[in-house]
Image (cartoon, helix red, strand yellow):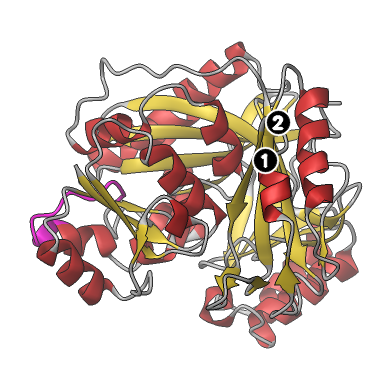
Amino acid sequence: MRVLVVGSGGREHALCWAIAASPLLTKLWCAPGNPGTASVAENVDIGALDIPALVAFAQGNAIDLVIPGPEAPLVAGLTDAMEAAGIPCCGPSQAAAQLEGSKTFTKELCDAAGIPTALWERFEDAEAAKEFVRRRGAPIVVKADGLAAGKGVVVAATEEEALEAIEAIMVARSLGEAGAAVVIEECLIGEEVSLFALCDGEHALALGAAQDHKRVGDGDTGPNTGGMGAYSPPPALTAELEQEAMSRILRPALAEMARRGTPFRGILFAGLMLTGDGPKLIEFNVRFGDPECQALLLRLKSDLLAALQAACDGELKHFDLRWHDHPSIAVVLAARGYPAAPESGSAIRGLDRAAAVPDAQVFHAGTRADPDGTIRAAGGRVLTVCATGKDLHAARASAYAAVDAIDWPEGFCRRDIGYRAL
């Protein structure tokens, strides 16, 4: 198969790394890719949102399957454009991608399908939203309705924090048009986990779970980020709870999407809160999480490309996946100043030493390469350093040994990834 992966982050490097091992693969491209994807695929200088150019490239290179990494091209209609050109794309249609593109859409779907989730209200007027917060009190959750690259959610411990979030999102438009409306929710209490499923429009196949670390600082302090690390599997999500989540949340969502005439195909990511009343949905995403993807794919024994092809072909009903028993961990190395104003351009050395640590794997995200091969920071989250081990203690020791082998004074990471399980 001739395959095109779309995106440039750590998730896309991990996808390329896993797909490159498939016996089904004949040629792999990544658009636009990064220095890490270049080691396992041919990078193509086309942006992830340049849909006409991506379609033209896929047509010109006889691509058999397109695999989108990030959510923005899916919400912009990448799958629709590819399929109109006769090219299979393992992602939801633009209509189905509203599961991530609009918090309101997802909440209305939950109400229609009876999916357990937080009580919620939508607001397009900032003053009305603030008055609601004053009536309800805190803790309370404020979410930008649209896409915000993982930064559109504020879990406010106080009323003042919630009011400031509304002011920033709706009035100052810190997140652009994503903040034209907000969804305000009750604050669910429990353990938060990410559950992934591969869907073919009718069937959902569990694709593993992970626990992400969103806050920038140790002990879950500081502002939310796109994710500072993850580990898999999370002990809090037992086999029984996973089955409950699949039967009460993911499969009803899939059935409701099909009933509406917008069947969902691709990766469905359910952010769950494990409450005293069972799993409840926090939000849906329509792609792999980052860095959860990196942690998950280290544990996958099965052929990822074969699974993605089966989803496109509507053949998941009898498909099965095999996993390594050993847990995995992913630690994000970010540029100084992240998430507010990450510094770029600094040189990163010691990547070969890090990759040589037993059971470790380094995935590139926000990096670029100089003509002489020097790797430099070119984003907020710059590297994801991953490892497996016989238990989570061993995996974490290997991951941080690899982190410590990297010479990058301008970078930082959390030192407590996996602490909830340990």
Q: Quadrant of the C terminus?
A: top right
Mark 2 highlights which residue? 358
- Which dot marks residue 41? none
Mark 1 nearby-residue class (10 Å; few <14, some 14–19, many ≥20)? many
Q: Quadrant of the N terminus?
A: top left
- What's drawn in magenta, residue-wise? 83-92
Task: Judge from the rendering whether residue 402 lies leftward or rightward of residue 10; answer left or right.
Answer: right
Name the kind of residue labelled 1 in the image.
Answer: Cys
Q: CA distance from mark 1 to mark 2?
A: 11 Å
Task: Judge from the rendering whether residue 292 lies leftward or rightward of residue 113; answer left or right.
Answer: right
Task: Judge from the rendering whether residue 277 lies leftward or rightward of residue 309; answer left or right.
Answer: right
Residue 323 drawn at (x, y percent): 51, 18
Can residue 394 be found in the magenta stretch?
no
**Residue at screen point 69% across, 26% down:** 234
Residue 108 drawn at (x, y percent): 45, 50
Residue 148 drawn at (x, y percent): 57, 68
Residue 174 drawn at (x, y percent): 67, 82
Q: Quadrant of residue 165?
A: bottom right
Mark 2 nearby-residue class (10 Å; few <14, some 14–19, many ≥20)? some
Mark 1 highlights which residue? 386
